[in-house]
Every structure is written in structure tokens, then in C-alpha cells.
Image (cartoon, coloured by chain):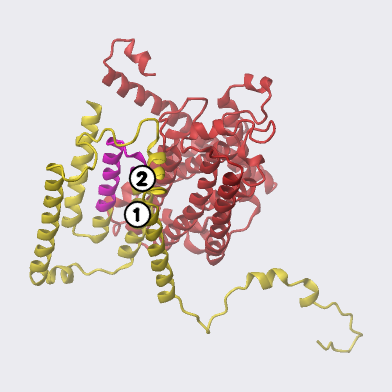
Amino acid sequence: MIQAFAFYLFTAIMLFSAVSVIFARNPVHSVLWLILAFFNAAGLMVLVGAEFIAMLLVIVYVGAVAVLFLFVVMMLDIDFSEMRAGFIRNAPLGLLIAVVLLAELGMGLGAWKTGALQLGTASGAAATPDGLSNTAAIGALLYTRYLFLFEAAGIILLVAMIGAIVLTHRQRSDTRGQNVGRQVARRPEDATVNVKPAVGQGVTL
Amino acid sequence: MIPFFEARGLSFEAAWTVSTIAEILLIALPVMLAVALVIYADRKIWASMALRRGPNVVGPFGILQSFADGLKVFLQETIIPSAANKGLFLIAPIITFTVALMAWAVIPFNSGAVLADINVGLLYVLAISSLGVYGVVIAGWSSNSKYPFFSAMRASAQMISYEVSIGFILICVVLWAGSFNLNEIVKAQKDHVWIINGFVANPLLFPVWVMFLISGMAETARAPFDLTEAESELVAGYQTEYSSMAFALYWLGEYANVLLMCALNATLFWGGWLPPLDIPVLYLVPGLVWLLLKILFFFFIFSWVKATVPRYRYDQLMRLGWKIFLPLSLFFVFAISGYLMATGHFA
């Protein structure tokens, strides 16, 4: 009863916020609705017993990706009338993408329904072996059977990361950065001299 | 608490609902009271380090000062700037405050005394603490004012930066404890080094704890890292346009977060509800008392730092997070997992 209530609550909020992502006038509101949708998806993951995935979803998507998203959208100066101007022109492309996504979703669901893919049971039970926590079960699979794929994903991410840094990094010659090592290594006797000049005499440095 | 309500004739569902709500109140209300008193303690500690007296008028030794402040703020008018995005402007402090209380669900107060004894407790804490940034960011944007907006940008960059190293630090703890469950982590610290309960006595984990303490201050935007509300640059940061109860919610949420960070320090590195030394006599004192003593000890450290350390500059903050803590914590993940593999800890 409680599970069913939670399921319908999360689903209803998620669907509503997913629709609101599209219909919200303000892009910042759209991102916030998207975050709410992520959050409720995490709730659904908890309900099917995939608590590790749920927490990762919140940490990675809600906690990091969406923050950057929000960050960028908030800084943009968006003109709403200009945004709506291209609607008719872009509508066929959008429609095409929507049809493709819908077809993929339908194919996926159909394949699952006919039993071609073994993705666990419909009830979501028996997802993890007995006596193992979710995290341990995922780890045991990821670091044994899928080790190569896991490491390949890691390398792809590393390449992407280095690429992003290389593309955006620039050496500026007109600013002087702080060299902390040099500052710490500098001793008072290198920088100051204590002199006692006679009256009327200057000091040469 | 479920059997207690079931014995009084409620069905399981009803008993579950009632007992969960009762447990939430049992945690949230003392936390709120603790926050009020801890604000007073913070001001007193800060004052005595500056050779002042601090609040000393309301009640004996000024102990009721926070409640008087609360009442004053409660009676003030809530001013909403006309250019603000009204809905988000009002939601933002609620988010901050709610998120600050949510993470307490997985903190074990004694052996088994925890609201949600979940397998992924530590990940839950990480997930909830990463939500905290939204209250600040939304406030900064919806205020439609430049200083709050600068503050929101600083806050989001700062919190994401330090979460990375906090993640690695927590992995070190999880590797050694072998579980994400906070109760299991506390139990794994029993007799960790000789008779000392706590990971902090371990030479490999001590530097990790130091990094966690400093990252915790940055994550909660406390004193040396309080760039989000740097009053010399940003008026009051993201709170600039807030007044009355909305402002008070930020105030309470901030201190609830600080207390949570103290509780995490105690739970992850200092043995949580275990006594500091594994001596039978010390187990006569309830675990809750040990945990509270440790939380207060860490709160004192947080206040002490606030009173004595000058504020970081923003580039220094980023440098510390990305160029020092990130490589160091990554190194310790390697070192600790290597040590554990070499000594056959996982076998």
C-alpha cells in the first residue's frame, strides 16, 4: 500500500515536471522542473530496490550536472520573443526527433515485453543476489565481467576531460598569477635589509 | 517504534506512517533546538575570542538570545523585491532549510538508533549535501539583484569543487569500513588502533580526516571559506534581499548544516556513538551522549576557526580545492586501497 502510494506519487510528480520542462516559459524554470523530474526518478529507483543507482542519479545529475546547467542558463540573457520566433521553422525537425525517440521507446518496451531481453523481472524483485547489498553486487559485476567496458568508459571520459581542458586553456601573458611555492620559499632576509644610515647620508640598495 | 503503534491497534501501514512521522519529529525538533543553542554558543565563543562578552542580556547568561532573535524576526514583515521571481524567491529558503534537516535521517545516534538504516547511507548524505547548493543558487537568481547573483555563482562553483574531494575522502572511509551504512562504519571503528575507537587514530586516515574537516568548512561555507556572504564584497551575498522568516530559515539551515558536518566528522572518523577508548567503564555512558560530546567538540573547532582565520580569496579557495585537496585525496584512495589489498583486508 505504502509502496503503491509512493510509486504513484513519484510517477505523477515526475510526469508533471517532465511536461513542465517543455511548457515552462522561463528556461530557468525548465531546468528546475528537470531537476524535480530527476529527483523523482531517483525515488522510483529506490522503490525497485536499486538504491545505489538512485543515489548516483541524485549525486551526479541533480548535484553536479544540473547545477552547471542551471548555472549556464541563469547567466544567459534570454529574449523570450526571439526564442519563440523560430518555432514554425524548427517544428518539423523537432517533430522528427520526437517520433524517433517515441519509436525507440516503443521498440525497447516491445522487446522487453516479448521477453527478448532479460532485464530482471517486471516486479523489479530479485534484482540483486541474496546476501549482497546493491553496491556490492554492482561492484562485483563491474570489476569482473564488465571490467574492460568499465575501463574503456573511464578512458573515454579521461580523453574528453583532457580535450576540454586543452580546448579552453590559454596561457595569458598579460596577467601575473600567484606563485605560491615562490611566496612560501621567500624568506624575510631576501626581501628586507636593516640599515642604520648616518645622518644626512642616503641608503643604496 | 512500529511494534509500539501496532500494539495499540493500528494496521501496519498506519503504524508505519505514524511511527515514521514521530521519529522524524523526534530528530528534527531536538536538532532545531540544538541549532538555536548552538547559534548562541557560536556567538559566545566568538565573543570570548575577541575579548567581548557576547549576548548576555536575554535570560541567564543570555542563553535565550536566539529565541528572542527568532521572535523578533518572526514578527517582521517579509519583504519581496518587486523585481524578484516571487515563487522561486520564497521556495529557495525552504529548500535550504529542508535539505539541512533531511540528511539527519541516516545519522546513527546509538547502536541501531537511526531513522533510516539504509545500505547507502553515506551516498545519501553526499546526495543530500549536493542538493544544498540549490537553495543558494535559486535565491541568488530569483532575487534579481547583482550581489546575490555573484554569490550564487560563487556558491555553486565552491560546493561542486569541494564535493569532489569529499567524495574521494568518503571512499577512503568506505574502503576501510567495507560498507556505506553509517552504523556499520561506526561499528568498524571499534578497537581500530589498539584500544582507540575511531579511524582518526590510523596514520593513513588522519590526514584524510584533516582534509575532510577543511572541506567540510568549505562545503558549509563557514568562516575561512564564507565567500558566498563576504560582507566586504557582496553585502550579505545570496541573503541580501531576504528579510524576516525567509532570512531566519537560511540562518537555521546554515547552522543545521554545520551541525551535520560536525556529526559526520564524529561518525566517520571519531567513532560516532562509541566511546573514545574501548574501556568497559566508558560504555556505561549512553552512545548518544558520546555522539553529542563529539559534535559539540567539532562545533567548537568550527567556531574557533571562524574566530581566528581570515577569509580566503576566491582563487586561493579554488586552488586549495582543485590543486591540493583533489590530488591528495586521490593519492590517499590509492594508498589506502593498496595498503588494504597488500594486507589482505578484503580477503
Q: Is B112 situated above or below A199? A: above
Quadrant, the N terminus of chain A = top left
- Residue receiving disc 2: B95
Q: Indicate the chain on which mark 1 is placed.
A: B
| Element type at mark 2 | helix
Of B54 and B13, the residue lying toward us: B13
Residue A169: % across, % down? 45, 76
Q: Is residue B66 left or right of residue A70?
A: right
Q: How far is disc 2 from disc 1 in space, using C-alphas?
A: 9 Å
Give the amino acid type for the residue marked by disc 2 in the picture: Ile
Which chain is displayed in yellow in the rendered image? A
Q: Is residue B277 left or right of residue A201?
A: left
Q: Could you say which is closer to the camera, residue B23 or residue A126?
A: A126
- Upstream in the sequence, badge 2 or badge 1? 2
Label 2 neighbour load within 10 Å: few <14, some 14-19, many 20+? many
Q: Number of numbered discs present?
A: 2
Disc number at residue B185? none
Query: Marks 1 and 2: in contact by CB < 8 Å?
Result: yes
| Res B152 quadrant in image | bottom left
x%, y% of residue A132?
40, 34
Q: Residue at x 63, y 28 (%)?
A: B275
Q: Is residue A35 magenta?
A: yes
Neighbourhood count class around disc 1 (C-alpha, 10 Å): few under 14, some 14–19, many 20 upward: many
Which residue of the protein is positioned furthest toward the front in this rendering? A145
Say whether residue A53 is magenta.
yes
Q: Residue B138, labelled with which disc?
A: 1
Please, what is the three-letter code of the amino acid marked with disc 1? Answer: Ile
Which segment is the magenta one? A33-54
**Which chain wears red?**
B
Of B139 and B47, nearer the camera is B139
Q: Are marks 2 and 1 on the same chain?
A: yes
Query: What is the secondary structure assignment of the residue under circle 1?
Result: helix
